């Protein structure tokens, strides 16, 4: 008959309901991670009993003689437990955030510093948790000691993150603390998943000193970089000046060599031109030498002939004057004499010469005039032998 009744009618109500608040949430009022022990009402004979484990929790059931068993979320029947008093405790199975604030310590220089951090922890052994009264406080003490051990090895500037270095970040500081925590014996039943540093502080005077030191360091670094840049620019300027000077020297040498080659070429050209002109003049001189010699000889002949003609004319005129005087003194009567007026006469009969005397003289004068005109009309191509034969 009893087997056909619902389970709620066979045993008492769910004991875990006593651990819930008005909102239906589990209150871990024993040590922050586990509830207080709750008595499980068992059915007739002390054998049957049941309970419900809410989500995000695990249940540790302790039976007579210390027999313990862990249950996951869900509804469970008590089976395998001997009759007697049975206790159940709900343990938080989801990650827990542990806030650790105002952790004070000293940097490696002795400056006072503070930090706040949040640790993400989780229960890995519910049996160990239900036997501890303050596991979170023990873990907090462990975190504080680890943080102080890490901080005392850091300079104040690194701790405060005042240097542009990834090792000075909050994440790097938190990882250093987590590494140190994991190197120590853990709190039973707990493990730390992650640590985050929410804040880090230092004395304002210390910060001012550090800032001033950083400003001075930055100024020195900027000055050093400026000096390096100026020095580099000076070296580059000197190198550029040297390059320009070398280029100017090369240009000057090229210009001088060009001028020298130009002058040498011009001199050689002038010399060649003078040689060509001299050769041309020499060739022209050689070509015109017979003509010049004939011109000289002809001029000498003309001068001699002209002198002879002038002498003959003078002699003829003197002879004619004599004949005229004699004719005037000794007239030839009965002779065949024809008279004519002289050049410049008045035609009165004075100064008339006989034709027998004037005719030979005129023939002689015409002959000399013909010789002179023939000599003057000779070509330069004629030879002296030709002129001699004609004379």
Image (tube, rainbow, N blue to C red):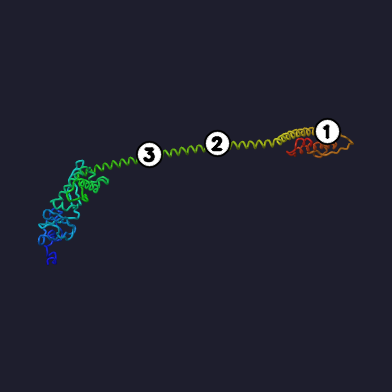
Q: CA distance from mark 2 to mark 1?
A: 82 Å
Q: Which residue is mark 1?
A: 323
Is label 3 or label 1 in front? 3
Q: Is residue 214 left or right of residue 366?
A: left
> Could you tell me residue 323's position as x and y percent?
83, 33
Q: CA distance from mark 3 to mark 1?
A: 122 Å
Is label 2 or label 3 in front? 3
Q: Secondary structure at mark 1?
A: helix
Q: Nearer the viewer, residue 99 or 308?
A: 99
Q: Are marks 3 and 1 in contact (CB under 8 Å)?
A: no
> Could you tell me residue 200's position as x and y percent?
21, 47
Look at 33% across and 40% down and name the residue there.
Answer: 228
Identify whether 66 is placed above or below 334: below
- Image quarter hosting the C terminus: top right
Instruction: State which quadrant residue 369 falls in.
Output: top right
Q: Nearer the viewer, residue 113 or 259?
A: 113
- Image quarter hosting the N terminus: bottom left
The label on residue 235 is 3
Q: Is residue 295 left or right of residue 111?
A: right
Q: Nearer the viewer, residue 218 or 40?
A: 40
User: Tag count in the figure?
Assistant: 3
The label on residue 264 is 2
Q: Earlier in the sequence, mark 2 or mark 3?
A: 3
Other residues around mark 2 within 10 Å, as few (<14) / some (14–19) / many (≥20) = few
Q: CA distance from mark 2 to mark 3?
A: 42 Å
Identify whether 346 is placed above or below 33: above
Other residues around mark 3 within 10 Å, as few (<14) / some (14–19) / many (≥20) = few
Q: Secondary structure at mark 2?
A: helix
């Amino acid at each position: 008959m009893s087997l056909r009744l619902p389970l709620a009618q066979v045993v008492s109500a769910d004991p875990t309901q006593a651990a819930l608040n008005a909102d239906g949430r589990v209150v871990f009022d024993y040590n922050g991670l586990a509830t207080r022990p709750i008595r499980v009402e068992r059915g007739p004979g002390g054998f049957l009993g049941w309970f419900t484990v809410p989500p995000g929790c695990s249940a540790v059931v302790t039976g007579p003689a210390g027999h313990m068993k862990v249950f996951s979320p869900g509804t469970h029947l008590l089976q395998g437990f001997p009759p007697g008093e049975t206790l159940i405790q709900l343990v938080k199975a989801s990650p827990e955030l542990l806030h650790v604030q105002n952790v004070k310590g000293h940097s490696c220089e002795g400056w006072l510093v503070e930090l706040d951090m949040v640790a993400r922890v989780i229960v890995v052994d519910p049996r160990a948790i239900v036997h501890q009264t303050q596991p979170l406080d023990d873990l907090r003490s462990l975190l504080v000691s680890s943080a102080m051990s890490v901080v005392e090895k850091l300079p104040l500037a690194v701790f405060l993150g005042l240097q542009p270095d990834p090792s000075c970040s909050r994440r790097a500081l938190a990882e250093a603390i987590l590494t140190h925590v994991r190197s120590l014996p853990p709190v039973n039943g707990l493990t730390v998943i992650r640590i985050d540093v929410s804040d880090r502080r230092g004395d304002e005077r210390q910060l001012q000193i550090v800032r001033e030191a950083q400003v001075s360091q930055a100024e020195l670094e900027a000055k050093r970089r400026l000096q390096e840049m100026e020095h580099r620019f000076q070296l580059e300027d000197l190198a550029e000046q040297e390059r320009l000077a070398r280029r100017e020297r090369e240009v000057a040498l090229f210009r001088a060599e060009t001028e020298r080659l130009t002058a040498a070429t011009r001199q050689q050209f002038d010399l060649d031109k003078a040689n060509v002109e001299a050769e041309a003049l020499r060739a022209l001189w050689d070509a015109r030498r017979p003509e010049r010699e004939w011109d000289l000889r002809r001029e000498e002949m003309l001068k001699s002939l002209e002198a002879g003609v002038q002498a003959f004319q003078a002699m003829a005129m003197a002879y004619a004057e004599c004949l005229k005087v004699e004719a005037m003194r000794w007239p030839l009567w009965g002779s065949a004499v024809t008279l004519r007026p002289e050049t410049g006469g008045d035609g009165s009969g004075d100064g008339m010469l006989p034709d027998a005397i004037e005719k030979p003289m005129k023939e002689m004068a015409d002959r000399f005039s013909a010789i002179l005109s023939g000599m003057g009309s000779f070509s330069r191509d004629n030879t002296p032998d030709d002129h001699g034969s004609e004379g």
